Amino acid sequence: MRISVAHWIRSALAALFFIIAFPALSQQPMTFDKEPLIIQTASGKRLNFTVEIADTNEQRQRGLMYRKEMAEDAGMIFDFGVSRRVQMWMENTILPLDMLFVDSTGTIRSIKQNAVPYSQDIIDSLTEVKYVIELNAGITAKLGIRPGDKVMSATTTKKK
């Protein structure tokens, strides 16, 4: 079997196209529904956010990757559908984030502050949670959000 030089060049160019195109395709915008979210602190403050909802595998895998900015009162809620131990990471995530690990009752169980952009380190919930909320880094310290505070949104209060 003889392969022509022209055929080989076309095949090589096609392979190069896919190598270059697929990372670019993975950065294409993905749409997320939004909802209001309230964090009720132990001190009685009600903090209002608007969060995007990541409730499919595809959306949870993408999360806030490739985002260059996010409003101070914005974030994302990851709904895992069932309570389980969750592991997150920051690969391809440009923004530094605070991650709130929330159980099925809407109680914040733990917080990872200032997760480092692009890090491949695993951020583990260490306990079973149903939701993870990502907010801009520093917002939990600034607003006094702590484990034990309550989260309320349509996602966290829907029928189980």
Image (spheres, rainbow, N blue to C red):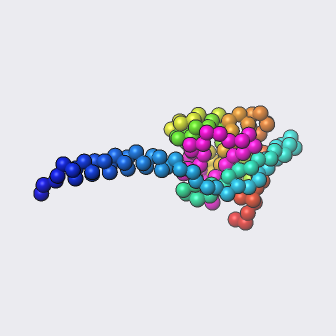
Seen at 53% across and 36% down, the residue is 119
Q: Position of residue 150 (x, y in %)?
A: 78, 49
Image: 105 above or below 74: below
Q: Quadrant of the C terminus?
A: bottom right
Position of 7 with respect to 113 (left or right) is left
Front-most of residues 83 and 98: 98
- Which residue is situated farthest in the left direction here? 1
Q: Quadrant of the N terminus?
A: bottom left
Q: Position of residue 111 (x, y in %)?
A: 68, 40
- Which residue is situated farthest in the bottom direction here? 159
Q: Position of residue 133 (x, y in %)?
A: 68, 47
Question: Which region of the structure is painted magenta?
Answer: 60-88
Seen at 61% across and 39% down, the residue is 68
Q: Position of residue 129 (x, y in %)?
A: 65, 51
The reply to whether residue 97 is in sight is yes
The reply to whether residue 147 is in sight is no
Position of 136 with respect to 142 (left or right) is left
- The quarter holding residue 45 reads top right
